[in-house]
Image (cartoon, helix red, strand yellow):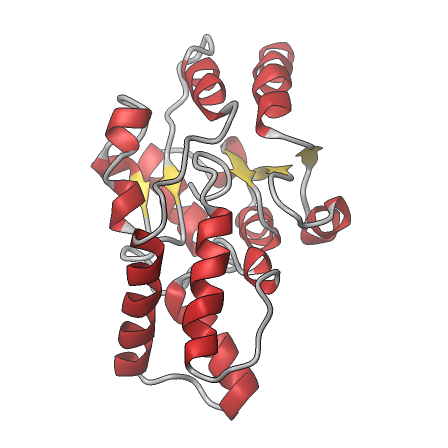
Amino acid sequence: MDGTLYDSMPNHASSWYQMVREQGIDCSPEEFFLYEGATGAWTVNLLYQRAYGRDATPDEVQRLYERKAEIFRSKPHPSVMPGAGRLVEAVRNLPWHPQTILVTGSAQGSLLGTLDADFPGAFPVERRVTALNVKRGKPFPDPFLQGAALAGVAPEDCIVIENAPLGVRAGHAAGCFTVAVTTGPIPRKRMEEAGADLIFDSMPQCAAELPEMLCKS
């Protein structure tokens, strides 16, 4: 969702950065692009391990994630990622009418609540895997395995579209054909190292080329 369907990662990264700096923990805005796709608890624990040598308590995770979400909501609503609508429509119109499943590490209600309006019929609530539905988020394969189960197909019959190394790692570990799209500042090489089977330089390029490739395969 973030960085593929919505151009929301700059807002997420700056919100994480502000919240973490408020706690007196050293960090950089850029590093949060690398954590995209992970659950809020995973990110908080990563930072706590680095700063304090321990995981955060559940109360600390909830408090910090709620503060991050508060900052995120104060920012302008992110726009739909250029090319995302075209890609979703093209995939849904493929001859075998594949199911589209949302698999996101986010629990950000302000974005989840606009999916029906921005992508009508593509991601109904019963075809969503969010941070609220899994115990282990990306980079573990669990979210994509759950997504395949929702679709009623084997993971190897699924195509994952991701924009971050953690998501690519998760899709690859699940056994899915994993497509990476570099919509942020993360170098292409990081996608290759994470196990991407195919890499596009933008969502418009992915929308233009991937459906045609699937029709020919």
Tell me the quarter of the image containing the N terminus.
top left
Tell me the quarter of the image containing the C terminus.
top right
Towards the viewer: 27 or 211: 27
For the image, the number of numbered tags is 0
Picture quadrant where residue 131 is located: bottom left
Name the residue at 69% across, 34% down: 198
Give the vertical position of 103 relative to 140 (above or below).
above
Towards the viewer: 131 or 99: 131
Residue 38 shows in the view: no
Instruction: Indicate the position of residue 71 as horizontal and vertical percent values.
Output: 34, 60
Picture quadrant where residue 180 is located: top right
Judge from the rendering whether residue 108 lies leftward or rightward of residue 142; answer left or right.
left
Residue 72 shows in the view: yes
Name the residue at 31% across, 26% down: 118
Name the residue at 51% across, 31% down: 157
Instruction: Indicate the position of residue 183 as horizontal and vertical percent values.
Output: 60, 39
Name the residue at 43% across, 85% down: 55
Going by the picture, which residue comes out furthest to the right? Answer: 189
Judge from the rendering whether residue 53 lies leftward or rightward of residue 105; answer left or right.
right
Picture quadrant where residue 209 is located: top right
